[in-house]
Image (cartoon, rainbow, N blue to C red):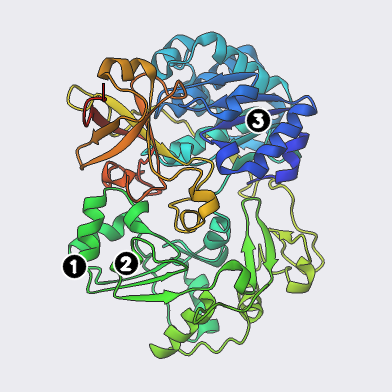
Amino acid sequence: MTNSIAEIEAARCIFVIGSNTTACHPLIARRIFRAKENGAHLIVADPRSIQLSRFADVAVNHRLGSDVALLNGIMHIIVREGWHAHAYIEQRTEDFQLLERVLKDYTPERVQQITGVDRKHLERMAELYATNHPASLLYAMGITQHTTGVDNVKSCCNLAMLCGNVGVYGGGVNPLRGQNNVQGACDMGGLPNVLTGYQPVADPQVREKFSKAWGRPLSERPGLTITDMIPAMLEGKLKGLYVIGENPKLSDPDWTHMHHALKNLDFLVVQELFLSETAQVADVVFSAASVGEKEGTITNTERRCMRIHQAIDPIANTLADWQIICRLSTAMGYPMQYQHPEEIFNEMRHLTPKSYAGMTYERMGLDGLQWPCPEVGHPGTPFLHQGQFARGKGKFHAVEHQDPAEMPDAQYPYFLTTGRMFAHFHFGTMTRVSPHLDIEQTTGYVTIHPDDARALMVREGDVLVLSSRRGRMEAPARISRSVEPGTLFLPIHFGENPTNVLTSAEAVDPLAKIPEFKVSAVKVSKLAPSPP
């Protein structure tokens, strides 16, 4: 997030797009409700009618994969009406003219054809966002899990800069991370092309610094993304896989493709709290300690690095993740003799001067610190780009709408989208072993619009068969107007009804390599007639 969670309450307008915030980020949703109580306006754009839609000044259900067109249409109106931040654009940004040329083609009439959103709603969304300052834009995986995910994010940034909402308290472009330490994992180099603090492995000076600290030469070649690993496994180029706290048998696209890829490995190691679907097919399983059984730090969605404190001793033969990795590294010939995670943290912050150098265990206290925190004594940074962007001037990107990789056709006439529901987290590795949570929803389901249910003669609870170009799966029907006619929704949490049987491993964003989980083309039929 460019801004802090608490600042949401100071926003005069909040635009939520591609995020079912109450179900996936309930504590952040509370901030939105408080902002509403303080008089803020709320705009919600999502292909489904979500709980947050009920409280919105304007809520629209745009067609799957039409985010760029929707955002361009809003910006078209803002520029047409002269509501954009002229001085801010002139002083703090570049390439506005390139964006302006593209926006001319995104008239309300054209955008309504692409998105299905009525022009009067487009006009109202544009007016609310542009005339209530500061405005905060929040998004989640409904924006990123597309073949146009990078373009979607660029369009969100375009809109925020257009109205002068980046680098101001209460504004910003604020992605809501999918898990509690996704931000921290990325910060620590959990990406194939960077080391800690997003220092590129291709930079010779960066490699020299880390090589000196670690006593080994480092390769200049980036690693593989997850979606690149799968074909590498199938081709025999990737022979071993070490999975830590992930469940690719459920989380990665195209179940059949992934199943064959895992079987083709010479060796699979899984490090996990519970015996997930992936752990069940592993050659070796390392039993990891939970968050309450270890010390360390996490960095959350607002860039806040916080200490976690051990509450109980590790159960049975479990170890903290860092201890498992150290033992494995030492056994493989590279000794790691750390005695405490604070040693690891101190090494990392000295190698990551721009963002983490000023943090220490003592300074973090109870509330943590937000990066960048470049030196001891620095208070941390609640919001980014104040006065000047990190790159100098904020860059506008001229982005055109593109259809999803798969559109409904005569053979597969329905849109399918996937996501979370309130009771479960991610792929259920933890929540589904909790009886109190699992009883809330014990099986997957297909949400289908009443019009489609009538056409298929489907009743509530009938078992439906969904098929895509990758495979088929079954799940009971849940009839609801929360989806639009022609669109189906599947929650991702249930191994008995795995959504990734249907989703595509080939449809990925060309830059980020994120699969298009949010859009697939499927057909649907009833498994058996309803009883009399």
Instruction: Give residue 236's mark.
Output: 1
Counting other residues with Cα less than 10 Å from the Cα at mark 1, is it few (<14), some (14-19), or many (20 or more)? few
| Quadrant in the picture for residue 295 | bottom right
Q: Which mark is residue 280?
A: 2
How far is disc 1 from disc 3 in space, using C-alphas? 51 Å
Closer to the chain start, of discs 1 and 2, is 1
Residue furthest to the front in view is 532
Q: Position of residue 85 (x, y in %)?
A: 69, 25
Looking at the picture, how far across and down is residue 231, in whole percent?
Answer: 23, 57
Q: Is residue 59 visible?
A: yes
Mark 2 neighbour class, 10 Å CA radius: few under 14, some 14 to 19, many 20 or more: few
Residue 392 appears left or right of 38: left
Residue at x 33%, y 34% (from the top left corner): 476
Q: Amino acid at mark 2?
A: Gln
In the picture shown, does residue 259 fall above or below 13? below
Structural crowding at the residue carrying mark 3, measured as other residues with C-alpha within 10 Å and reported as few (<14), some (14–19) or many (≥20): many
In the image: residue 458, left or right of residue 203: left
Q: Does residue 387 appear anywhere in the picture?
A: no
Of badges 1 and 3, nearer the viewer stands 1
Residue 125 vs 295, above or below: the answer is above
Judged by depth in the image, the label closer to the viewer, 1 or 2, is 2
Which residue is painted at 30% across and 57% down in the image?
A: 228
